[in-house]
Amino acid sequence: MTRVIRYIFNDILRTRFILFYTGFLLVSTFALFQLDSDFGKVVLSLMNIVLMVVPLVSVVFTTIHFFSSYEFIELMLAQPINRKVIFLSEYMAVASSLCMAYIIGVGIPFIMFGAGQNVISLLLTGIFLTLVFVSLAFLSSVLTRDKSKAIGIALLFWFYFSLIYDGLLLWIIYSFSDYPLDKITLSLIALNPVDLARIIMLLQLDISALMGYTGAFYKNFFGSSMGVLFSSSTLFLWAMIPLLLALRIFNNKDL
Amino acid sequence: MILINDLSKKFGRLTVLDQVNLKMNAGKSYALVGPNGSGKTTLIKCVLGMVKPSSGSIEFKGQDIENEWKYREQIGYMPQIGRYPENMKIGELVDMMKNIRREVTSVDEELIDSFKLYKIYDKKMHTLSGGTRQKVSASLAFLFHAPVLILDEPTAGLDPISVEILKEKILHERRMGKLMIITSHILSDLDELSTEMVYIFEGKIQYNNSIEALKKETNETKLNKAVTTLIRQKELLNSITEQV
C-alpha cells in the first residue's frame, strides 16, 4: 500500500496545486494577523474563510485529481493489487496532502504569533472538513465516468452544505418559530458538516453569549464533553459513510 | 488453467458477452478472433477483473477470481490502447512497475533491449507516438516472466521490424510452455503465433477448436482464408434458418 501511496504523492506534488493552496492559506492568515491584533477576531475571520474555502478546494482538487489519475488506476488494476488498496491509497494520499497544506498554511502563522487553545479546534475542524469533503468528492467521482459531471455533482455537494442548507434551516426556524425548536435544530445541524464545524468553532470563541437563549442551549450541549464527543463522532461519520459508499461502488465498477 | 463458466456481461441494455464457456490450458496459444465490438476486449478485461461480469464465473487455476487479486501476479497484460500516467517518463514507468511487483526478483528486459527503449528512457509518456507506446506496453507485459500472457492486438501500429521482434518473443515464450491469449485482426500473424482458434461473434463463441482442425474443415491452407470461409458458412446457415 505504501508503494502505491508514494507514487500518488509524487504525482500530486508535481502539479504544484497543493503548494499554491498552502501559500494562499499562509498569506491570508498572515494578512488577518496584520489587520487585527485581537486573537479571537482573527480566528473568527479565519473561520469564515476556512468554512468556505476548505470544502471548495477539497472538492474541486479531489475530483480533478481522481480523473487525471484514471490512467494510473487502470494500470494498477491489471497488477496484483487489491482494488480496495488502490482506492484507499488514492484517498489517503489526497486527504493527507490537503490536510498537510492546511496545517502548514494556518498553523505556522499561529505558532509565530503565539497559539491559543482555540487554534487547535480551528485546525481540527479544518482537518475534519477536508476529510468529509474529500470523501464526498470521491463519491461523486465514482458515481459517473464523466469528469465534468463528477465536478458538477461535487460542487453541488458544496453548494448544498455551504449555502442551500442554511437557507432551508432558516426557513424552517422562521416558519415554526412558535414552537420549541432547540432539539430539532440541533439534530438538523448534525445533518450538515459545515454547520457542525461552524458551531464547534463559535463555541470555542465565547461569543455564544451573543446568540441568546439558543446560544446558551448550544453552549450547554456542545460545551460538555458529551457534546464534543457527539460533534466529533458525527463529523467522523460524515467522512466515513461517503468514503465507504464510494469504496463499495469502486469495488464493483467496470474500468 | 483458465475456466470461464456461463459468463455474461451487460452494459445497460446491451449484451456484450452472452453465456460464454471457455477452457484455456497452459502451453497453448489462443487466437481470439471476431469483428469489432464482438466482446473480445470485454472478455479479456473480465479475466483480469477490470470488468465485473453480470453473471457466470471465471476460475484461474481452479480458484474463483471474484474479488481476488493475487492471481494477477501470474498474468502479463498488454492492453489494446496503452494508457499510462502522461507526465511520467518511460524509465520512471518501468521502475514503478518493477517496484509495484517487487516480489519478482528476476525481470525479463529482453524486449526493452531489442526495442532500444532504454535510449528514450527520459522521454515523457505524452510525447510518445502510438507505436512507441505499444512497444512500452509489450515490454511491460513480458517484464515479469508471467506464466499467462494476454495480448490485446499486440502488433497493431508497430513497424515491420518491431512486429518481427515481438513475434519472435511471443513464439519463444510459447515454446516455454506459457498460456497465451492473443487478439488480432491480422490473421496471418495469428497463423504463426497461435495453435487454437476462438471465434467470437456478438458476444457468443461461434467456434472453438485448434487451427489445424479449422483448416481441415474448410479445406484451406491459410488461416485468413479458413476464417473467411468459416464466416461465410455461418452466414449461409443463418440465412437458411431464417428463411425456414
Image (spheres, coloured by chain):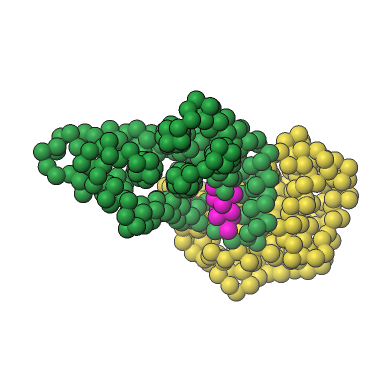
Instruction: Name which quarter of the figure residue B122 lies in.
Output: top right
Q: Is residue B114 left or right of residue A206?
A: right
In the rendered image, residue A106, in percent from the top left (x then y), is placed at 54, 39
Q: Residue at x 27, y 50 (%)?
A: A220
- Chain drawn yellow in the picture: B
Task: State the image quarter where residue A194 is shown.
Answer: top left
Can residue A230 be seen in this snapshot?
A: no
Q: Residue farthest to the bottom?
A: B62
In reply to whether residue B92 is colored magenta, the answer given is no
Closer to the camera in the image, B107 or A245:
A245
Give the residue furthest to the top. Answer: A35
Instruction: Tell me which corner region of the image, top left, top right, bottom left or bottom right, holds residue B215.
Output: bottom right
Residue found 76% across the figure and 38% down from its top: B124
Q: Residue at x 89, y 49 (%)?
A: B114
**Residue nearer the viewer, B72 or A246:** A246
User: Nearest the camera: B243 or A166?
Assistant: A166
A235 relative position to A59: left or right: left
- Any part of residue A58 in sight: yes
Residue at 43% across, 51% down: A239
| Residue B180 on image: x %, y % | 72, 61
- Colour assigned to chain A in the rendering is green
In the image, residue B150 lies at what x, y percent?
Answer: 69, 57
Q: Which residues are magenta?
A: A85-95
In the displayed structure, B110 sits above or below A30; it is below
In this view, A35 is above or below A86:
above
Q: Is residue A9 left or right of residue A236?
A: right
Dominant secondary structure, magenta? helix
Residue A200 pos. (x, y %): 37, 45
Work out which quarter of the rendered image holds the N terminus of chain B and state it. Answer: bottom right
Q: How many marks?
A: 0
